[in-house]
């Protein structure tokens, strides 16, 4: 007689089995195409639903230094890990005093660089803005800036990001466009609209701002699924790949890792994912080489964002 499946109390607990005893899906590394660097969780905004709880006072991830990032880039070259792209996120990256130095270092090494920013005052200050202009002149479209615009309307955007967060962000976008930066926009499914409705709304915004962006192109406009922590999501089993018509090789942790500097830590840690900064189950060591190991999809975000949401943070 067949045994009943083993049951694990609660979802996303056992790295091998789901709560119903099925084999949990996992992702094998195939290459380190993208290294994400969290520059620190401090941000000039306190959004209503920030993916990693960044605020003006949250320094749980402290500022990573340019020297620490250089050590990781040295390792990627030495170990021939195939690194193509370096992505910077936060918090707000431009609040880190070392940020433009690490940005320039990654570009000088020949990497493509993607910066996620709110394009507000930290970016617009004379020091960072002049450094950006110099790097754009030297490296052109190898430097890409993705600005977070949580909705195409001021009202919904400010409901998420706070009062007086719209106009400074628009000023930053206009400055980037006027100076010829490779620009894209990151939106979120906040309002209950369909993706088609969202893209149509952003198309109107792009037209109003005279931006050379195509709202129907995912490279110009990335729309991320909303990360509702209260929403129930299914666990991903090994059978789901066939049922969903997806491959583990398509999931972000097959080709990306993230470096974070935990407050008080002696060195950065390498994580499997940009979205799970505080879950130590997804910490894979302190070197890039040792981090290239299989990742169990043992977090609700794995299902919500990557597998079912079909999202990727990479450029």
Image: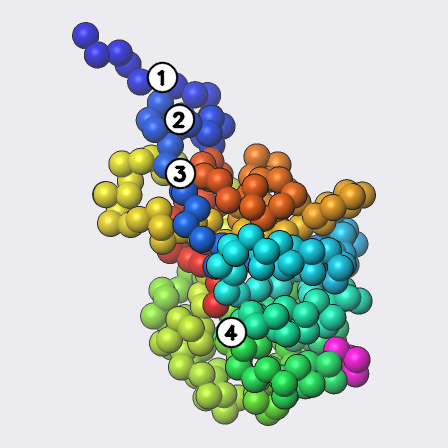
Front tag of 3 and 2:
3
Q: Is the magenta stretch mostly helix, strand or loop?
A: helix
Residue 308 visible somewhere in the drawing: no
* Residue range (magenta): 124-128
Disc nearer the start of the sequence (4/1): 1
Kindly identify the residue that appears in the image at 67 percent across and 50 percent down.
260
Q: Nearer the viewer, residue 147 or 151?
A: 147
Q: Distance between the residues labelled 3 and 2?
A: 11 Å
Residue found at the very far top of the displayed protein:
1
- The residue mark sitting in front, 4 or 2, is 2
Residue occupied by mark 1: 6
Residue 70 on image: x %, y %: 69, 60
Instruction: Identify the residue position indicated by label 2 in the image.
Output: 17
User: How much space separates mark 1 and mark 3, taking CA atoms?
Assistant: 19 Å
Which dot, 1 or 3, sits closer to the camera?
3
Labelled pair 2, 1 in contact (Cβ < 8 Å): yes
| 125 inside magenta stretch | yes
The first of marks 4 and 3 along the sequence is: 3
Which residue is label 4 attached to? 185
User: Which element is circle 2 on?
Assistant: loop
Per the model, the C-alpha gap separating discs 4 and 2 is 37 Å
In this picture, residue 8 sits left or right of residue 289 = left
Judging from the image, what secondary structure is the residue with disc 4 in? strand
Residue found at the very far front of the displayed protein: 78
């Amino acid at each position: 007689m067949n045994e009943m499946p083993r049951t694990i109390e609660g979802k996303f607990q056992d790295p091998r089995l789901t709560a119903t005893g099925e084999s949990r899906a996992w992702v094998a590394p195939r290459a380190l195409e993208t290294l994400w660097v969290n520059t620190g969780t401090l941000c000039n905004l306190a959004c209503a639903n920030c993916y990693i709880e960044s605020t003006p006072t949250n320094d749980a991830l402290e500022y990573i230094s340019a020297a620490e990032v250089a050590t990781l880039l040295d390792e990627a070259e030495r170990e021939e890990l195939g690194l193509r792209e370096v992505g910077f996120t936060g918090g707000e990256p431009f609040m880190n005093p070392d940020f433009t130095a690490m940005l320039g270092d990654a570009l000088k090494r020949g990497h493509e660089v993607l910066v996620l920013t709110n394009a507000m005052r930290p970016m617009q200050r004379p020091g960072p803005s002049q450094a950006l202009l110099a790097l754009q002149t030297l490296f052109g479209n190898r430097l890409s800036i993705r600005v977070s615009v949580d909705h195409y309307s001021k009202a919904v955007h400010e409901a998420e990001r706070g009062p007086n967060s719209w106009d400074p962000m628009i000023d930053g976008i206009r400055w980037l466009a006027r100076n010829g930066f490779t620009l894209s926009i990151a939106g979120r499914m906040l309002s209950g609209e369909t993706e088609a409705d969202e893209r149509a709304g952003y198309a109107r915004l792009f037209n109003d701002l005279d931006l050379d962006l195509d709202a129907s192109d995912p490279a110009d406009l990335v729309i991320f699924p909303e990360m509702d922590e209260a929403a129930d999501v299914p666990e991903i089993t090994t059978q789901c790949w066939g049922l969903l018509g997806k491959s583990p090789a398509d999931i972000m942790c097959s080709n990306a890792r993230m470096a974070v500097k935990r407050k008080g830590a002696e060195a950065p840690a390498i994580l499997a994912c940009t979205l799970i900064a505080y879950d130590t189950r997804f910490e894979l060591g302190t070197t890039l080489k040792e981090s290239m190991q299989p990742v169990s999809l043992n977090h609700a975000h794995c299902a919500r964002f990557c597998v079912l949401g079909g999202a990727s943070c990479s450029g």
